[in-house]
Image (cartoon, coloured by chain):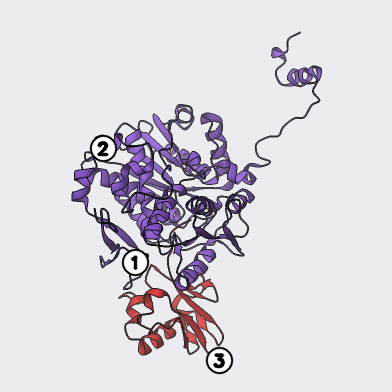
C-alpha cells in the first residue's frame, strides 16, 4: 500500500498529465521531496523559499486541511489520500 | 474592439505577474497565485467618461469597458444599479453624520450581489463557448447561477453545503438546476469543486472562471461613486467571506481615478466578519498580514468561509487604506438585522446583520469618526435566511374577526388610542 496524491490541473504538465501519483508513507514534507525527485520542479511550485507551503496552496490529507493537522509534519500512512488544491474565491 | 478580448489584455498572476491568455483558467501554474484580468486602461479612458456612463441604461453594464466581457453581455443584462439609500435614522442611532446603504438585497434577479458576478461570469462563459456552468456556493451564488443559467438556456450544476437555509435551497431548485448538497462546510464543497473542475470541462464560475467572475463585484463600487454624486465615500464597510468583494470595491474606486472619471481621493475600506468565522478580522486586529484558517460556526452562513482565498489581499487593502475590521456574535448579527429593518425598512440577510453590527462597533470606537460619511454594503436579502430571525422578532397575536377582541388587545397596548 502507498499514499495517493491527487495532482491539480496547474501541476499536471510536470507529472506528464498524471492525475494520481503514489508516494511512500511518511510525512507531507517527505512526500513533497519524493515528488520533487520524480517530477523535478514541482517542489518550488508548492513551497516558498523559506520552506513553507505557499499561501495559495491548500493541502489536504483525507479531506482535512494540513493546517488543522501538523502542517508539513503531518504523518502519512498507507491508504491515505492527499489532495493539493488552489485557494478558491467565495460563493 | 477585438471579438474575444474587448478591453482586456491578458490574465495576470497577482503574485508574480506572469501573463496568461484570456481563457477559463484561474491559477498561476508557477506559484498558484490567483489570476486577474489586466485591462487596456488607455483605451478605456478614451471610451468611458461620466457623460458616456450617464447616457446608458441604469444597469451594471453602463461600466462595461471595466468589466471582463468582450462583446455585448448575453446573461444578466438587467442586473445592478440597486438603490443607494440615505439612512438618516440608522445614522442617528449609530452616531455618524452621514450613512448610506447600498442595497443589493433587491438586486435583480435573485436578491443578492451575486447577480453582479454571475452575469459577468456567465456572459464570459458563453463567449468562451461553454454549455454547462457550475459553482461552489454558500447559497446566494447557487441561486444566481441557477436563475441566470436558466434564463440563458445553460445547464447548471450547483454545489452547496447540505445544511443551508431552506430558502436558499428552494431558490436554486425552482430554476431546474442540478443542486448537489455536500455533507460538509463550504470549504469542503470548495475543495470538491476544485477537483471536479479539474476533471470536467465546465465553466465553474468561482473556480476556472474566477478572474472574470470576481471583477463583477467592482460594479457595486462604480455605482456607489456615481450614486453619491461622483464622490468616493470616506468609509466603506463590507462583509467578508473570501474577502473578494472588499478588494474589488476598492479596485473600482482606484479604476475610476485611473481612467480620469474621478480625482485623487482618500478613503478607508473596513471589513466585517462573524465571530464564528473570523479569520480575516482576527488577523487584522492582531496586526498580521496572514490569517489562520478556521472551522466556521455562525448563523451568517453566506460568510462561513474558513479558508478565505482573498484574505491576504483584503488585509492588504485595509492596511493600505487605514481601514479596520471587527466581528460580531450571532446575537449582535440579529440585532444588526433588526435595527436596519426598524430604522430603514430594509430586511437584510445575516451578512447584512454582520455589516451593520460591525459598523456600529467601528463608529462607537471612533475608528469611523462621528463627523464622517460611510456606506454600508448590504449584499443579500433577509427573506432567504428567515430561520436566523424566527423566534427573535416577536410573534403575531391571533384574534377572531371581532372589533371587540381587537379593542381589548389595543386596550392592553395603548389604552389612550381606544375610541369609546
Name the image quarter holding residue B374: top left
Q: Which residue is mark 2?
A: B52
Give the residue at x 75% y 30%: B397
First of labels 1, 2 by sequence position? 1
Q: Position of residue B139 (x, y in %)?
A: 55, 53
Q: Is residue B13 above or below residue B394?
A: below
CA gap between label 3 and label 1 equals: 34 Å
Chain coloured red in the rendered structure: A
Q: Is residue B328 left or right of residue B165?
A: left
Foreground of the two, B73 or B235: B73
- B198 above or below B120? below
Q: Residues within 10 Å of mark 3 (few under 14, many from 20)?
A: few
Residue extending furthest toward the top: B420
Q: Provide residue B308's location: percent of width, then percent of height.
A: 44, 59
Chain letter behind tag 3: A
For the point 37% across and 89% down, the residue is A38
- Which colour represents chain B? purple
Name the residue at 60% across, 51% down: B174
Q: Which residue is mark 3?
A: A1
Residue that mark 1 sits on: B33
In this view, the residue in front, B179 or A91, is: B179
What kind of element bears circle 2?
helix
Spatial separation of the CA atoms under disc 1 and disc 2: 35 Å
Amino acid at each position: 500500500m502507498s499514499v495517493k496524491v491527487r495532482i491539480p490541473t496547474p501541476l499536471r504538465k510536470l507529472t506528464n498529465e498524471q492525475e494520481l501519483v503514489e508516494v511512500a508513507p511518511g510525512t507531507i514534507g517527505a512526500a513533497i521531496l519524493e515528488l520533487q525527485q520524480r517530477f523535478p520542479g514541482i517542489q518550488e511550485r508548492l513551497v516558498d523559499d523559506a520552506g513553507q507551503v505557499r499561501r495559495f496552496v491548500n493541502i489536504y490529507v483525507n479531506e482535512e486541511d494540513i493546517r488543522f493537522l501538523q502542517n508539513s509534519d503531518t504523518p502519512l500512512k498507507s491508504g491515505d489520500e492527499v489532495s493539493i488544491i488552489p485557494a478558491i474565491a467565495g460563493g | 474592439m477585438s471579438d474575444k478580448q474587448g478591453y482586456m489584455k491578458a490574465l495576470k498572476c497577482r503574485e508574480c505577474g506572469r501573463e496568461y491568455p484570456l481563457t477559463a483558467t484561474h491559477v498561476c501554474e508557477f506559484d498558484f497565485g490567483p489570476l486577474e484580468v489586466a485591462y487596456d486602461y488607455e483605451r478605456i479612458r478614451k471610451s468611458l467618461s461620466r457623460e458616456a456612463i450617464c447616457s446608458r441604461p441604469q444597469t451594471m453594464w453602463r461600466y462595461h469597458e471595466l468589466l471582463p466581457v468582450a462583446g455585448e453581455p448575453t446573461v444578466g443584462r438587467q442586473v445592478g444599479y440597486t438603490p443607494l439609500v440615505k439612512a438618516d435614522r440608522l445614522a442617528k442611532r449609530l452616531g455618524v453624520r452621514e450613512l448610506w446603504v447600498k442595497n443589493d438585497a433587491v438586486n435583480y434577479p435573485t436578491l443578492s450581489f451575486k447577480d453582479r458576478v454571475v452575469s459577468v461570469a456567465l456572459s464570459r462563459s458563453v463567449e468562451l463557448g461553454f454549455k454547462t456552468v457550475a459553482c461552489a456556493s454558500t447559497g446566494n451564488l447557487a441561486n444566481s447561477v441557477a436563475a441566470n443559467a436558466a434564463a440563458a438556456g445553460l445547464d447548471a450544476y450547483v454545489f452547496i453545503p447540505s445544511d443551508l437555509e431552506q430558502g436558499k435551497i428552494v431558490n436554486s431548485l425552482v430554476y431546474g438546476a442540478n443542486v448537489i448538497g455536500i455533507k460538509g462546510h463550504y470549504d469542503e464543497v470548495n475543495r470538491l469543486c476544485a477537483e471536479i473542475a479539474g476533471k470536467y470541462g465546465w465553466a465553474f464560475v468561482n473556480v476556472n472562471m474566477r478572474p472574470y467572475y470576481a471583477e463583477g463585484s467592482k460594479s457595486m463600487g462604480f455605482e456607489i461613486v456615481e450614486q453619491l454624486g461622483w464622490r468616493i465615500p470616506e468609509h466603506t464597510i463590507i462583509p467578508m467571506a473570501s474577502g473578494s468583494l472588499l478588494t474589488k470595491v476598492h479596485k473600482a474606486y482606484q479604476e475610476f481615478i485611473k481612467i480620469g472619471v474621478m480625482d485623487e481621493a482618500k478613503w478607508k475600506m473596513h471589513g466585517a466578519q462573524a465571530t464564528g468565522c473570523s479569520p480575516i478580522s482576527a488577523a487584522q486586529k492582531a496586526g498580521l498580514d496572514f490569517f489562520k484558517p478556521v472551522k466556521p460556526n455562525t448563523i451568517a452562513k453566506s460568510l462561513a468561509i474558513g479558508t478565505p482565498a482573498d484574505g491576504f489581499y483584503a488585509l492588504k487593502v485595509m492596511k493600505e487604506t487605514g481601514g479596520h475590521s471587527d466581528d460580531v456574535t450571532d446575537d449582535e448579527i440579529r440585532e444588526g438585522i433588526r435595527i436596519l429593518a426598524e430604522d430603514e425598512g430594509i430586511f437584510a440577510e445575516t451578512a447584512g446583520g454582520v455589516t451593520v453590527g460591525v459598523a456600529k462597533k467601528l463608529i462607537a470606537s471612533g475608528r469611523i469618526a462621528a463627523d464622517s460619511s460611510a456606506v454600508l454594503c448590504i449584499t443579500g436579502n433577509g427573506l432567504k435566511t428567515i430561520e436566523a430571525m424566527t423566534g427573535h422578532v416577536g410573534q403575531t397575536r391571533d384574534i377572531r374577526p371581532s372589533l371587540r377582541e381587537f379593542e381589548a388587545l389595543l386596550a392592553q397596548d395603548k389604552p389612550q388610542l381606544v375610541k369609546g
